Amino acid sequence: MQLQLQTFSSLVSAAAAAVQGSAKQLIDLTVGSTLRALLEASASVGLWMQWLILQVLQMTRAATSTDADLDSWVADFGLTRLPAVAATGSVTFSRFTPTNSALLPLGTQVKTADATLAFDVTQDTTNATWNAALNGYLIPASQAAVTVPVAAEVAGSSGNVQANTITLISAAISGVDTVTNALAFTNGIDAETDAALRARFQNYINTRCQATAAAVSYAVSSVQQGLTWTIQENTTAASIYTPGNFVVTVDDGTGDPSRALLANVQTAIAAVRPVGSAFQVLGPSVVAANISLTVIAAAGYTQTQAVAAVQSALTTAVNAGGMGTGFMFGTIYQVALNCPSVAAVEGVTLNGATSDLTVTQAQVVRAGTIAVS
């Protein structure tokens, strides 16, 4: 039943009509009269009670609950809001005199130029300079720079910074002088919104009694925000036709998801997979998009400004694609010409050709060499 909301005036009018209808003579309800004051006071209490009712109704439905009330509502079904994801990327530490070796400890803090955002150096065992015994990156003598991964200390989109904005080293490091990030950070994500949580709750309910592709997709989506994935049925990772086996390829935007993330996805899928089936969870095969083009700077801009803007914009555009999504050749022109500093574009090639870049369901496109002149 739809609740019929009343205004202050309608409450007073209804009360006045009821009083007058029950009286045998004309009642004084003019402004300032005692009876009118009583009716208006009662109407004020009625409005307050109406507001309380609306608050209760709002909190008892997922469609209208917000923030902590929505969290409490879905928690009754065992569902929780997905947390924020910290922005990650790479920074390059450099030094002016690379005479001796230098140690870059794990957890080294760097900040943006205005010192408002902090990032910590994280572990990358595949980096040639990583030294497990020293718990850090050992820069050898004669090497002037090293590029290492960092993660924002505060999770969320606030950690998405532009290129060349991380320039401060919080504490002095012997033998290391400067730091900068060549590329923008774009993978920081705020905590799941109310709208996204409601949509995921519907998928949660709809897939509880099913062992379908939708149920597997829900399981993956509940591990972490920002994931893209594809599901290949009746095949193995080696593309061999195998009934009852399926492959889930997952990417977190980096092209190289961690083993811990893939393990979490594996666990989530195992809880909803069909009985008697087998599956594998893999990271994507990265296809590099190597782009070459020449730009002409617009009036009021230098060629250096135009080149830097196009490189950053193209890198972001290429890396924005998800699993199994190719990259259109025409997008290069569109992205470059959308930069205010660019007047014209010519000599465009994508991986040495002038055609679209297509990928399989298990592949993801990521920016390779972006050569802008």
Image (cartoon, helix red, strand yellow):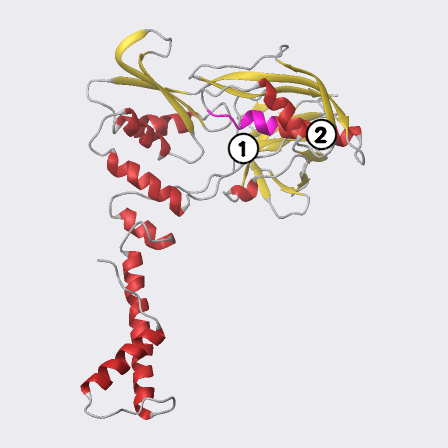
The residue segment tinted magenta is 315-322
Q: Residue at x 32, y 92 (%)?
A: 34
Q: Residue at x 31, y 79 (%)?
A: 12
Q: Is residue 102 visible?
A: no
Residue 56 location (% of width, % of height):
28, 61
State left or right for residue 247 relative to residue 143.
left
Answer few, some or many: residues within 10 Å of disc 2's Cα (few below 14, many 20 plus, some between 14 and 19). some
Give the CA distance from mark 1 to mark 2. Answer: 27 Å
Residue 229 location (% of width, % of height):
40, 25
Residue 102 location (% of width, % of height):
67, 29
Mark 2 belongs to which amino acid? Ala
Element type at mark 2: helix
Residue lying farthest front? 25
Q: Nearer the viewer, residue 188 or 48?
A: 48
Q: Does residue 316 show up magenta in the picture?
A: yes
Q: Nearer the viewer, residue 192 or 345?
A: 345
Locate residue 51: give its quadrant: bottom left
Locate residue 199: give its quadrant: top left
Classify the position of the N terminus by image quarter: bottom left
Question: Which secondary structure type mostly characterizes the magenta part of the structure?
Answer: helix
Q: Nearer the viewer, residue 334 or 92?
A: 334
State left or right for residue 19 relative to residue 255.
left
Residue 63 location (% of width, % of height):
32, 49
Answer few, some or many: residues within 10 Å of disc 1's Cα (few below 14, many 20 plus, some between 14 and 19). some
Compared to 235, does 336 lie above or below?
below
Q: Nearer the viewer, mark 1 or mark 2?
A: 2
Compared to 278, does 257 lie above or below?
below
Compared to 194, does 366 lie above or below?
above
Q: Label 2, on which residue?
A: 308
Q: Label 1, on which residue?
A: 122
Mark 1 and mark 2 in contact? Answer it, CB < 8 Å.
Answer: no
- Mark 1 or mark 2: whose residue is earlier in sequence: 1
